[in-house]
Amino acid sequence: MDRFRIRGGTPLRGSVQIGGAKNAALPILFSSLLTEGRLKLKNVPNLQDIVFTIKVLEHLGVAVDSSPSSHEVALQAKDLKSYEAPYDLVRKMRASVLVLGPLLARFGEARVSLPGGCAIGARPIDIHLSGMEAMGATIELHEGYVLAKAKRLEGCRYRLPFPSVGGTENLMMAATLARGETVFENCAQEPEIANLAEVLVSMGAEIEGAGTSTIRIQGKDQLSGGEGTIIGDRIEAGTFLLAALATQGQVKVNGIKPNQLEAVLKQMEVCGARVKREDNAIAIESTGKLKAISFKTEPFPGFPTDMQAQFMALLCLVPGESQISETIFENRFMHVPELARMGAAIRIAGNEAIITGPSVLKGAPVMATDLRASASLVIAALAAEGETNIHRIYHLDRGYEVMEVKLKQLGGDVERLRD
Ligand code: UD1
């Protein structure tokens, strides 16, 4: 198993290219199931979750042509072998439930394992299922599996009880092949949803309003091949910006639209960062006088839950009492005991974390517990005195492409070692 050995204390300086967004690439790869035509994608990040998604698609019978070094993938779902995403696949990557909408809409049938509990909370899929039911599907739960059937999905009006990202994506994909018009209200508005819609439109789908709370879709009898480019990863970009602040450095991230990260940039400014927004890049530097802040995680355009752990690592270094409320997931403070091992003073009260700073963080052996928690430990280690070994970085490899190479490029002292 790989680990990172990080020797902290060097300010990060320079510029870094941000890769394609994992969370946009996953649903877009799954959208290939909607058509027998060929789907050609660019800027697909080379990550473990992408490798895994390709495995799931190949298991179903999709022909996949991927060239990880050029970040291009072509997919063709002509004759499928199976309409099922088994437990073993869904357990490893929850986003596998995104096969449900496309399979049901195109083939009239899908069998998907219920995801069950995962490291960051219960994460049910009731919204995905009730939306499909509203489109006329029958849903049966049997031995841990969802069996969804529909001769042809019917357009409808459905209000999501909560703006679930995956729910919006699954339902939007399903509705592209439904009969007539479907209107979804209270949709998730994350930039990844608009990216998925762009690709679906290139396949002949008719979608209005993706990226806003109301999405209107005119269903088609079939979709064609298509193409698309994955947007930049706002979470990767934000992680590098926070690492720059934590080490009192100066970093520019290229390949990211600032408005996709605005809620995070605002908090960085309140905290005392100087932020420069460019067309497709963001530059940051510390004013040297950072101060405590409070925020809560929310659906987009609010502060993303996927940046909470990384921002907490920075707040450990800041004088005063900061407060973070996590409103999206329960159990998303698993990085706290690990940060505490490095000297952080953090108290948890329900869904709130109270961080008292400044702490002088000290290198220690720590354990990555999930993807974003691992990124927060990297930030803490870069700012800490001495050497930190972060174990189980396979979590990090799910969502950050060659992170150690990029950090080294910025002057960080980071090595990937194999035990
Ligand atoms: C996606 C992202 C993930 C991010 C999250 C929130 C991908 C692959 N993953 O996850 O990185 O942290 O959005 O921005 O894009 N919920 C229900 N019922 C449902 C669906 C969700 O109760 O049917 C709840 C979940 O348990 C959770 C909250 O809604 O508490 C948010 O979930 P959701 O927006 O669906 O997140 P994901 O799509 O799983």
Image: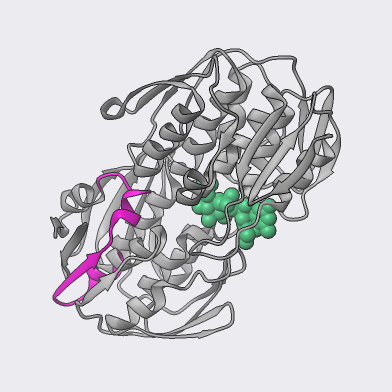
Whether residue 121 can be seen here: yes
Q: Quadrant location of the C terminus?
A: bottom left
- Asked if residue 372 is positioned above or below residue 99 in the image, the reply reads below
Position of 334 compared to 303: left or right?
Answer: left
Q: Position of residue 412 (x, y in %)?
A: 17, 59
Q: Position of residue 167 (x, y in %)?
A: 67, 45
Does the magenta portion include 380? yes
- Asked if residue 161 is positioned above or below residue 185 in the image, the reply reads below
Q: Position of residue 315 (x, y in %)?
A: 39, 75
Judging depth in this view, the residue of 236 and 56 nearest the camera is: 56
In this picture, which residue range is highlighted in magenta? 379-402
Position of 334 compared to 392: left or right?
Answer: right
Whether residue 301 can be seen here: no
Ligand 1, by image quadrant, is bottom right
Residue drawn at x 58%, y 70% is 330
Position of 303 compared to 278: left or right?
Answer: right
Residue drawn at x 72%, y 37% is 148
Q: Position of residue 77 (x, y in %)?
A: 53, 19
Give the colour scheme of this rendering: one colour
Position of 47 compared to 22: left or right?
Answer: left
Q: How many marks?
A: 0
Q: Quadrant location of the N terminus?
A: bottom left
Residue drawn at x 38%, y 61% is 274
Does the magenta portion include 213? no
